[in-house]
Image (tube, grey):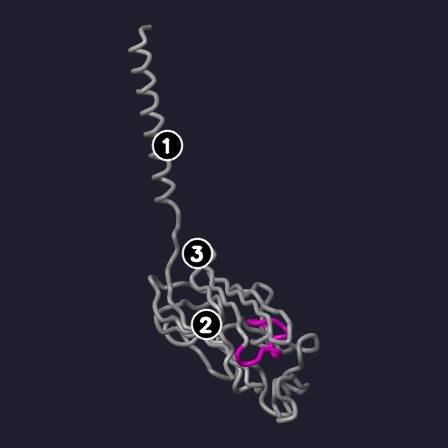
Amino acid sequence: MSPVVGVMLMLVVTIIIAAVVSAFAGGLSKSTDKGPSATFEVHIANDGTWGGSYFDISTKAVSDAISTKDLKIMTSWKAVNGTRGGATVTGPNLTGGNTHYGSYTYNSPLGFGPGVNQSAFTGSYYPDQMFGNYSLMAGTRMHNSAAGFSTSTGGYGVSVSSRYQYTAGSYHLESGNDGVDAMESLLGMNWYVLRPGDTVTVQVVHIPSGRLLYDDKVTVEG
């Protein structure tokens, strides 16, 4: 075989290999799920009372409707007193819910607005609004407050003397006794040590694609 023919054969083989690799890489790029995109506005508040403490994510825009069963919400923080905490929420939770009071359970955060078939603001929440059962669209809110109402029912910061702490009652006992309220589910068991000015890292992940939809430090409001 002459040197010229040998070089030509090598060139042909190289071109064929390059074409195969290019086609394979192109197939991979087409099959890879880049996932949806979304824009959120997040607020976290703790004023020491159940009514003034909340976790809220407002959906400003989405590329496509996003089922919350495909989402994971992660929080992490370090309070000014040095305490660290955080939580991870996925939906639906097959064990019955991440928020519970005795036998009553549901998945936080609850959904309100577009993408939620029906919702209630108090009392027994609808399955449709439980995290994992609704979809995110422009205008959808994911929201929960701390549990409590009065000194007789108990809960978080239900009296002037119990600000920034839980007290026992017929409605709610602190985690480890009778329940885990929504703020504990979303921020961790010691969330109440957070004070205005502390920051919480909040991440929202689209599980199928692994895409990070939101990642920012949120300043706690009072």
Mark closer to the chain start, 1 or 3: 1
Mark identifier at residue 21:
1
Q: CA distance from mark 2 to mark 3?
A: 25 Å
Which amino acid does the dot numbered 1 rest on? Val
Task: Locate residue 55 relative to residue 171 in the image: left or right.
Answer: left
Q: CA distance from mark 1 to mark 3?
A: 26 Å
Of all residues, the one furthest to the right in this rendering is 177
What percent of the width, then of the height, locates residue 82?
Answer: 64, 72
What percent of the width, then of the height, locates residue 95?
Answer: 60, 65
Residue at numbered disc 2: 128
Which mark is nearer the camera, 2 or 3? 3
The residue at the point 51 percent across, 78 percent down is 220
Which amino acid does the dot numbered 2 rest on? Asp
Of all residues, the one furthest to the top in this rendering is 1
Which mark is nearer the camera, 2 or 1? 1
Mark closer to the chain start, 2 or 3: 2
Mark closer to the chain start, 2 or 1: 1
